[in-house]
Amino acid sequence: MTDLFKALVTALLLLLAVAATAQEQVEPAQVTGSAPVASAGYKKIALQDAFRYAVQSAIGAQVNSETVVKESALLKDRIIVKSDGYIRKYEILEESTSAGEYTVKIKAWVSATELNKDLFLNGINVDQVYDWAGKPRLMVLMTDLIDDKVSATPFIQNEMEGLFRSRGMTVIDRQQLGNIQQRDVQLAYSDPQKAVALGNRYGAEIVIVGKSVSKYSRELDVAGFRQYFYTTQLDAKAYRTSNAEVLMSQVYADGQDAGDTSAMGKHDAAVRSVQQVIGRNATDIVFRVVKSWYQGMTKANNYQVILSRIKGSELSLLVKQLAQGSGVVQVHRRSFNSGTAEIEIEFEGVQSALIELLEGNTVVPLALVNEEPFRFSMEKEK
């Protein structure tokens, strides 16, 4: 192996490592584990102990302490017990034995992305969900009704968009939706096909439709000032635009312990009531939409793949290699004609992962040409 070739290989490995780190956030932690020397396999037991502390440290960086205390049993039984699965690599820094106790200090790299995903799917509130959820684009179409009249200010839409943006999700900018009429927004709530059509028009994978209905509740005179109270009911639905699947359909309302939402003006009181409903149910709204989206994307789906500029011999080898790929259930060869082939792949995972699998094959270099939900085209690179 020449020095030049070695340098090229080293550079390639470095680029792959950087790319992997960018896709999967990995956090280092220095932790210590221990075990009685009398235990069989005590070094392994101590290492497992250190892994658990590393994962606990990573959890503490993503989840507030109040939640950690409240959900300690769940974290212990479902997350910390899987500590090995979150450790990407580790280095032993120190080893010592004292009073019959073996101690090992390590530097461990925890997959924060994988941990974040498992925390969320087990109902633990986390801030960022976009890095593992398949990176869907969301579109929000919601109407405000105050005392049975449509509000000129779309504050329910503002609140819902802000909610998903705060979790790192991509929400289509409202300026792009400027030509959608209020009538269409209202129709989208009651007509799933209308909602899906609007979502597809603007390139959204998820469209969230709904309405908030705020009604005058009561008013009080406080020290000579009139205070108004409103109650709000939020009806929200979310659809997957590729197949009109319902991801979430839920009604949220003010609770008896909603707190003080009063204001000196009726409009302001209605706004505070809406904000209260969104704030109290934010975790549940995001959880329902994202969990359903992710589970639908990671279950086995059939993907139609068009390949061009490919030889018949290359196609046969490619199909054979793909059948062994991670997440691939089966591969069907549909047709081949003059260098263009159609294959159907049953794949457990998001579409982007399947494209990466095809781009990384060792039979024929392929590049993505066109992509639609569950269907994409690739061609052999010249």
Image (cartoon, rainbow, N blue to C red):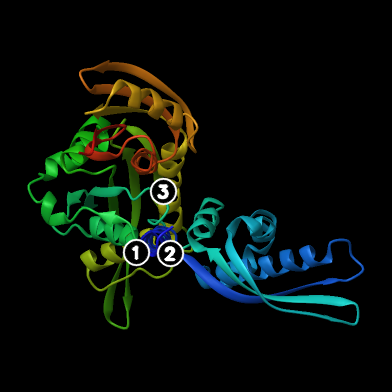
Q: Badges 2 and 1: C-beta atoms under 8 Å apart?
A: yes
Q: Which residue is mark 1?
A: 166
Front-most of 38 and 4? 4
Label 1 environment density (alpha carbons within 10 Å; few <14, some 14–19, many ≥20) = few
Judged left or right of residue 161, residue 70 is right
Vertical comparison of 142 with 310: above or below: below
Above or below, 85 relative to 361: below
Residue 145 at x, y = what percent? Answer: 22, 51
The N terminus lies in quadrant? bottom left
Q: Secondary structure at mark 2?
A: loop
Please determine whether, in this image, residue 315 is positioned above or below residue 382. Answer: above
The residue that mark 3 highlights is 290
Residue count near mark 3 (Cα–Cα under 10 Å), binned few <14, some 14–19, many ≥20: many
For label 2, count other residues whose C-alpha is less than 10 Å away and answer few (under 14), some (14-19) or many (20+).
Answer: some
**Amino acid bearing label 3:** Val
Q: Is residue 255 left or right of residue 198?
A: right
Q: CA distance from mark 2 to mark 1?
A: 7 Å
Do the CB atoms of the residues marked 3 and 1 lie less than 8 Å apart?
A: no
Nearest the eye: 128 or 106: 106
Residues 278 and 145: in front is 278
Q: Which mark is residue 148?
A: none
Question: In the image shown, does 352 or 179 lie closer to the viewer?
Answer: 352
Can residue 100 be spotted in the picture? Answer: yes
Please state which amino acid type lies under the numbered disc 1: Ser
Q: Which residue is mark 2?
A: 127
Q: Earlier in the sequence, mark 3 or mark 1?
A: 1
- Quarter of the rendering containing residue 218: bottom left
Q: CA distance from mark 3 to mark 2?
A: 12 Å
N-terminal of the pair, mark 2 or mark 1, is 2
Quarter the C terminus occupies: top left
Separation (CA) of disc 3 from disc 1: 14 Å
Give, as a three-letter code, the residue at label 2. Asp
